[in-house]
Image (cartoon, grey):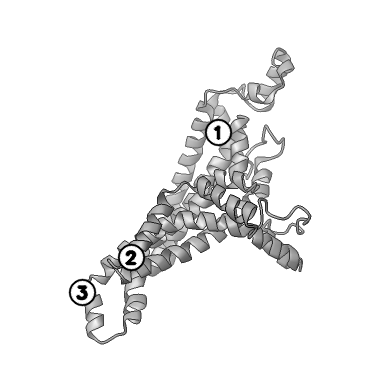
């Protein structure tokens, strides 16, 4: 199958999924047994029916659900996610403000987790049933099962509070000003502005939370890499390659690892989507102004437009990540290209 047909086919499959997600997000957000009036109006205004009626009219709460959904869908197709009840700003502007911090943190975290997980998985598969294999499997099990918020608290307490080896919470130090806004990523914006001290400070603040997230996702990546590589190394063509006298490094990297990467890419994509959706507890512990903290504040204040906007964003992130994974499948698996 030519690549452009494969690309268009996957893109068309994503459209009805996105429409279904908007409907699901709308139903769930409006099915919550809570009233945004009580959460957002002051106590002295709750006895004034005129103020309550004006609030309902302003935020469209006086319209039937079907009409509200169709209006929201029409606005969404034009790039309008509505106005946040809490911040009184467009939801899309809030997302643009908070999302870059999460993308920056998630990208650093998945890079570290990918290097750690794939490396440990390869080592564990090569030295199967040896002490190093048992150690890697034990560490991977801890990484999968250990709560990420507890790992973050331990790392912050020991490495920052007691030893002072890493920078504290936040994206920058207290006395460091934000770089001029270009992309929203402090590391990139500081480099574009030539602010090397700001760049170093931003990287130092990224180090601990990204390592925590990387350790959290590396356990699953290492286990999948190990099991997939072991399965591939037991196939006949691997034994044929070894019988030809190829060096073990060539057999593993060129013949074994590439075919073992398909399930690994899937796990990496899902892990990255999970980190992009906002690690709420990690962002709260490290005072990281990301989309997770924004979602938490929207939920506690019954900010329905913000809740729906972030829910749709998270769903679209997963769809986008799965779309990229499908594209990678095309290049990794020749069976897809020949189907």
Residue, x 64% and y 37% (percent of image)?
82
* Disc 3/disc 2 C-alpha distance (Å): 24 Å
Residue 337 shows in this picture: no
265 to 303, vertically: above or below:
below
Residue 57 left/right relative to 1: right
Q: What element carries label 1?
A: helix
* Disc 1/disc 2 C-alpha distance (Å): 56 Å
305 to 292, vertically: above or below:
above
**Neighbours of disc 1 within 10 Å: few (<14), some (14-19), many (20+):** few
Q: Disc 1 or 2, which lies upstream in sequence?
A: 1
* Disc 1/disc 3 C-alpha distance (Å): 57 Å
Residue, x 74% and y 62% (percent of image)?
198
Q: Name the residue tied to disc 1.
A: 70
Q: Is mark 2 on a helix, strand or loop?
A: helix
Q: Which mark is residue 236?
A: 3
Q: Where is residue 73 in the image (x, y as percent from the top left)?
A: 56, 38
Q: Cβ–Cβ below 8 Å for labels 1 and 2?
A: no
Q: Name the residue tied to disc 2.
A: 133
- Looking at the image, which residue sits at the far front? 162
**Quick one: 26 or 44, which is closer to the camera?**
44
Residue 103 shows in this picture: yes
Residue, x 27% and y 71% (percent of image)?
233
């Amino acid at each position: 199958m030519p690549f452009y047909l494969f690309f268009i086919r996957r893109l068309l499959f994503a459209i009805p999924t996105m429409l279904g997600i908007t409907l699901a997000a709308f139903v769930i957000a409006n099915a919550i047994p809570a009233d945004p009036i009580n959460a957002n109006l002051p106590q002295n205004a709750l006895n004034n029916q005129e103020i309550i009626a004006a609030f309902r009219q302003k935020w469209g709460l006086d319209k039937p659900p079907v009409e509200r959904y169709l209006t929201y869908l029409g606005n969404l197709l034009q790039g309008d996610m509505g106005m946040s009840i809490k911040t009184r700003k467009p939801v899309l502007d809030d997302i643009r403000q908070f999302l870059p911090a999460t993308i920056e943190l998630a990208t650093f975290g998945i890079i570290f987790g990918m290097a750690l997980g794939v490396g440990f998985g390869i080592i564990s598969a090569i030295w199967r049933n040896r002490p190093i294999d048992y150690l890697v499997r034990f560490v991977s099990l801890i990484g999968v099962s250990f709560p990420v918020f507890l790992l973050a608290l331990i790392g912050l307490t020991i490495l920052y509070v007691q030893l002072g080896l890493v920078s504290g919470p936040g994206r920058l130090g207290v006395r460091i000003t934000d770089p001029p806004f270009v992309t929203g990523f402090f590391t990139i914006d500081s480099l574009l502005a030539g602010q090397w001290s700001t760049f170093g400070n931003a990287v130092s603040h990224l180090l601990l939370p990204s390592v925590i997230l990387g350790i959290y996702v590396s356990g699953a990546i290492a286990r999948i890499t190990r099991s997939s590589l072991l399965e591939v190394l037991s196939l006949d063509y691997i034994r044929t390659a070894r019988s030809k006298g190829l060096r073990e490094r060539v057999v593993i990297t060129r013949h074994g690892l590439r075919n073992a990467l398909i399930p690994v890419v899937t796990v990496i994509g899902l892990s990255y989507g999970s980190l992009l959706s906002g690690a709420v507890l990690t962002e709260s512990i490290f005072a990281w102004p990301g989309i997770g903290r924004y979602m938490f504040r929207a939920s506690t204040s019954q900010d329905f437009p913000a809740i729906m906007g972030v829910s749709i964003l998270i769903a679209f992130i997963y769809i986008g990540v799965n779309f990229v994974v499908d594209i990678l499948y095309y290049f990794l698996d020749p069976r897809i290209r020949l189907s």
